Structure formats: structure tokens, C-alpha cells
Image: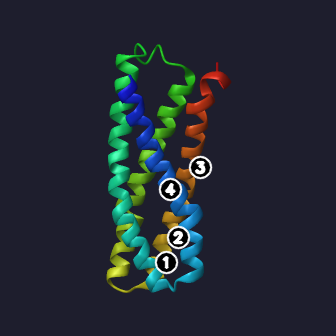
Amino acid sequence: MGIALLLHLLAAVVWVGGMFFAYVVLRPVAAAQLEPPARLTLWVGVFKVFFPWVFAAIVTLLLSGYWMVLSFYGGFDAIGMHVHLMMWAGYVMILLFFHVFFAPFKRLKRAVAAADWPAGAKSLAQIRVLIGINLSIGLVVVAIASGGRYLLS
């Protein structure tokens, strides 16, 4: 159980913490200091490094989560409402991430490669909104994970 929980928590920290850093710290500094070509190119590079970590976090979260539910908690009927809420919120986060990766990020890479800065800015704006939503959900999941057993029982 200890290994599964550790992997689960580390994966959540990587994903949610990475979104927090990108959204709250890097985004405003990049917007204030960089012109569109440099800013959009920076974001493509950042996402190319961060998104494989998100894919790894998703796989780790799913495997470790199911491992804990099925091996230690007695199955889905035995887990509390807070765990069900975490799972469903996680599914929403995964779907939002897949949309970001396969739609606006793909368009952002294409726009930057073509030096089409207005199209790139539009794609980055879509990514910003979706990551903001995912970050909000992720922070709620952290709250549910840390206190849900006590708040929702």
C-alpha cells in the first residue's frame, strides 16, 4: 500500500504542481517580458517537456489508484464517496488534458513552426483556459484527497 500511495501522490504533485507553476508563475512573467514569437516558442518548448510528464503521471495515477482500490480498500463498493469524487474529477482532468494535447497544442506547434503568431496566440489562449480549469479541478482533488474522508463522511 505504501508504494502505491507514494507513487499516486508523486504523480499528482508532478501534474498539479506543474500546472500551478506554469499558470501562476511562468505565464505572467512570459507575457510581461517576451514578445509573441519568443513567448510562443517558449511555451512549445515548455509543453514538449511537461506533457510527457503528464502522460506518465496519468498512467501512474490510474495504475496506483486502481491498485489501491482493488488490493487494499476492498473494491469500488467499499471506498468512500471522496474516492469516487477524486476518480471522476481525475477522469475529467484526463479528458481535458487529452483535448489540450491533441487539439490546441497541436495547432500551437504548427503555428509556431509556420511563424503564424496570431494563430499561435489563439491556440495558447485556449490552452491557458483549459489548464486553468484543470488546475482548479486538480486543487479541488487535492483538497478532497487530504480532507474528503472527514468532510464527506
The amino acid type, in three-letter code, at marker 2 is Ala
Rate crowding at label 3 as few (under 14), some (14 to 19) or many (20 or more) other CA atoms within 10 Å. some
Residue name at image x 35 percent, y 53 percent: 53
Element under label 4? helix
Identify the mark at residue 47; answer none if there is no mark. Answer: none
First reached walking from the N terminus: tag 3 or tag 2: 2
Residue beneath disc 4: 19
Element under label 1? helix
Camera-nearest residue between 15 and 78: 15
Residue beneath disc 2: 125
The amino acid type, in three-letter code, at marker 4 is Met
The amino acid type, in three-letter code, at marker 3 is Ser
Give how far apart the Cα atoms at labels 4 and 2 are: 15 Å
Residue beneath disc 1: 121
Camera-nearest residue between 127 and 62: 62
Instruction: Specify the quadrant of the image occupied by residue 106.
Output: bottom left
Residue beneath disc 3: 136
Give how far apart the Cα atoms at labels 4 and 3 are: 10 Å
Q: Position of residue 37 (x, y in %)?
A: 44, 85
Residue name at image x 47 percent, y 79 percent: 39
First reached walking from the N terminus: tag 1 or tag 4: 4
CB contact under 8 Å: marks 1 and 2? yes
**Up-down relation of residue 44 to residue 81 (above or below):** below
First reached walking from the N terminus: tag 4 or tag 3: 4
Which circle, 4 or 2, is nearer the viewer? 4
The amino acid type, in three-letter code, at marker 1 is Ala
